[in-house]
């Protein structure tokens, strides 16, 4: 017969979560500021309630049973939601908050100064942590290590970075859609030629290693038409690719979103841009929806709701001022 939640002391669930983290009665007791005997008694109650041993002693510590493992993420989610409920403001501007962001840069850097100013005006003594978006960032959102992600996805129907392939527990909102451009140094020899696909493919390319891949939708589109570009250099981000493309005495081309043009101007990089030499149907497959992403459990988190709203406002202002273009 299914047991009622009212028959379970919810403090036991907190103990269970710590046991799953520590795999040790003594370490759990230390974190709870109780004796190991008290933790052992709590574990006995949990075993009785769930009708499962939950943990087995091994030479390396406690080893969770399959049932305990299956509850680990749910317990973490439950604890985070509990903290959010307890943090419901007794005053409107809680202090000491931490904002954890994972974003593609230089995308975030365009408005990051304005964002941090807004955060510190509203949330005194807040800490803002920004990490580069990488292959582990989506999992970091799931683990609760990142509040909000902001990055480009892909529109190609066979792309593994399609928005339609995001896990069901990730919510998202597209802020704007960009298209890639080709970036060349001001005296690049290609600028003396007719700009077409043949010219584009004649020169070596700088590619971005994006989520453990050196290729992206552009390479898929080229393959569909029987073409292939020569990737001579792979770099970890758009800033590095822009910097390298601007250096003298080489013939490398860089491909990056159009918004990077503003970043280049800010940093005095002597680059010019050319459109991708592809037809309209091909370009539709290269469209990049720049997307905010967060875990569903944070859908009602006041801090994250406010931050999403502020980012939308700042990027809307960037479009209105001409910093970004549709």
Image: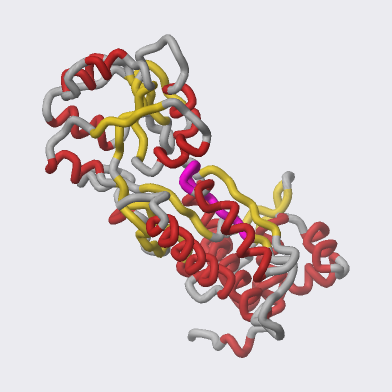
Total numbered circles: 0
Location of residue 278 with respect to 299 vertically, above or below: above
63 or 10: nearer the eye? 10
Q: Is residue 99 left or right of residue 32?
A: left
User: Which of the 4 image quadrants contains residue 71?
Assistant: bottom right
30 or 52: nearer the eye? 30
Q: Is residue 87 magenta?
A: no
199 or 319: nearer the eye? 319
Residue 325, horizontal then vertical, whole percent: 33, 50
Residue 31, horizontal then vertical, whole percent: 81, 63
Q: Which residues are magenta?
A: 99-107
* Residue at the (81%, 68%) spot, across then down: 32
* Residue at the (56%, 75%) spot, across then down: 302
Location of residue 193 with respect to 138 vertically, above or below: above
Q: Is residue 95 left or right of residue 101?
A: right
Q: How is the image coloured?
A: secondary structure
Q: Is residue 100 magenta?
A: yes
Residue 270, horizontal then vertical, whole percent: 44, 26
* Residue at the (56%, 52%) spot, across then down: 112
Residue 318, horizontal then vertical, whole percent: 43, 56
* Residue at the (38%, 44%) spot, across then down: 259
Location of residue 9 with respect to 153 vertically, above or below: below
User: Which of the 4 image quadrants contains residue 36?
Assistant: bottom right
Identity of the residue furthest to the top in this view: 249
User: Which of the 4 image quadrants contains residue 35?
Assistant: bottom right
Q: Is residue 177 left or right of residue 212?
A: left
Q: Is residue 282 left or right of residue 55?
A: left
């Amino acid at each position: 017969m299914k047991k009622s939640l009212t028959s379970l002391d919810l403090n036991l669930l907190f103990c269970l979560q710590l046991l799953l983290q520590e795999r040790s009665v003594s370490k759990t007791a230390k974190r709870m500021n109780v004796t190991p005997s008290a933790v052992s008694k709590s574990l006995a109650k949990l075993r009785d309630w769930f009708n499962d041993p939950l943990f087995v002693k091994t030479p390396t510590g406690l080893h969770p049973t399959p049932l305990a493992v299956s509850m680990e993420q749910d317990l973490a989610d439950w604890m985070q939601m509990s903290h959010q409920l307890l943090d419901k403001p007794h005053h409107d501007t809680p202090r000491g908050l931490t904002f954890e962001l994972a974003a593609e840069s230089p995308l975030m850097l365009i408005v990051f100064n304005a964002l941090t100013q807004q955060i510190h005006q509203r949330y005194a003594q807040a800490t803002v942590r920004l990490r580069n978006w990488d292959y582990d960032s989506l999992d970091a959102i799931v683990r609760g290590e990142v509040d909000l992600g902001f990055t480009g996805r892909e529109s190609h129907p066979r792309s593994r970075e399609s928005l339609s392939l995001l896990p069901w527990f990730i919510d998202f909102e597209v802020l704007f859609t960009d298209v890639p451009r080709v970036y060349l140094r001001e005296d690049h020899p290609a600028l003396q030629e007719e700009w077409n696909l043949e010219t584009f493919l004649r020169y070596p390319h700088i590619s971005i290693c994006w989520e453990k891949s050196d290729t992206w939708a552009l390479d898929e589109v080229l393959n569909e038409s029987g073409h292939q570009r020569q990737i001579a250099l792979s770099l970890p981000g758009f800033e590095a690719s822009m910097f390298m493309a601007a250096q003298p005495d080489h013939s490398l081309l860089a491909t990056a979103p159009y918004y990077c043009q503003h970043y280049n101007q800010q940093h005095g990089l002597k680059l010019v841009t050319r459109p991708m030499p592809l037809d309209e149907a091909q370009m539709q497959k290269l469209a990049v929806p720049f997307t905010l992403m967060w875990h569903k459990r944070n859908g009602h988190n006041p801090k994250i709701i406010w931050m999403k709203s502020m980012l939308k406002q700042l990027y809307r202002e960037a479009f209105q001022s001409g910093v970004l273009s549709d």
